[in-house]
Amino acid sequence: MTATRRRAASGDAGGDGGGSTFRGALLIGVAVIVGVVLLGQGFESGVLSSDSSTPSEEEAASGDNGDGGDATTSTTVTPTTHATAQVRVIVLNGGGPPGSAGATRTTLSAAGYTTLDATDTEPDVAASVVYYTPGFDADAAAIAAAIGITAAPQPMPEPPPQNTPVGQVDVVVVLGPDFTPPG
């Protein structure tokens, strides 16, 4: 048997089997690194940036559906909400009507949210506000809508409102004098 036949029989045709395996692994490694870098640029804090859009969203918003005609629909990105039982909420009375924090807690609890005991906070606020921890902005918006707060939810301030059990809640509702209790 000749040397060429021995290499072919052993799977080493041309003597390049190890080199091509190494190049293939290197190519895969480079592709993974490029993918991670590109994905990292499209995300902020683990959530797709709200100011970014895909080409199809830009076309839909501009009325161009790519075939030369006009589109009549648009596409929007909707933030993800959690199951209500997975959202921990505390309601703080920051100058709202007496008893409104308890009534609001009861409403949210009946809607399925995990609620902590309502309490007061100091100083009083000028208007009702809903705060959220990272990743719970859509849940905060749903809670605000459910209880009639029209102001856009805000990221949790540092420091958080007085009597906020840090690390134990995802959404904090602070009721001000503008609040009308549910019911």
Image (spheres, grey):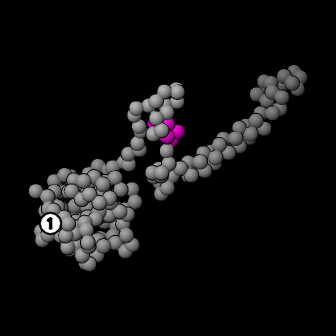
- Examine the rendering and report whether any part of residue 58 can be seen: yes
Question: In the rendered view, does 158 fall on the left or right side of 130?
Answer: right
- Examine the rendering and report whether any part of residue 56 can be seen: no
Residue 153: % across, % down: 32, 60
Please tell me which residue lies in front, 66 or 22: 66
Position of the C terminus by quadrant: bottom left
Q: Read off the residue under disc 1.
A: 100
**Residue 167 counted in the magenta span:** no
* Magenta-colored span: 54-60
Determine crowd level at label 1: few under 14, some 14-19, many 20+ residues with C-alpha closer than 10 A.
many
Quarter of the rendering containing residue 13: top right
- Return the residue found at the far bottom: 123
Q: Residue at x 12, y 71 (%)?
A: 98
Please tell me which residue lies in front, 2 or 113: 113
Residue 148: % across, % down: 21, 56
Position of the N terminus by quadrant: top right
Magenta-colored segment: predominant secondary structure? helix
Quarter of the rendering containing residue 118: bottom left
Decide: is 1 above or below 177.
above
Residue 175: % across, % down: 22, 67
Amino acid type, callout 1: Ser
The tally of labels here is 1
- Return the residue found at the far left: 183
Question: In the rendered view, does 46 fall on the left or right side of 169?
Answer: right
Please tell me which residue lies in front, 8 or 60: 60
Residue 65: % across, % down: 48, 31
Decide: is 41 above or below 163.
above
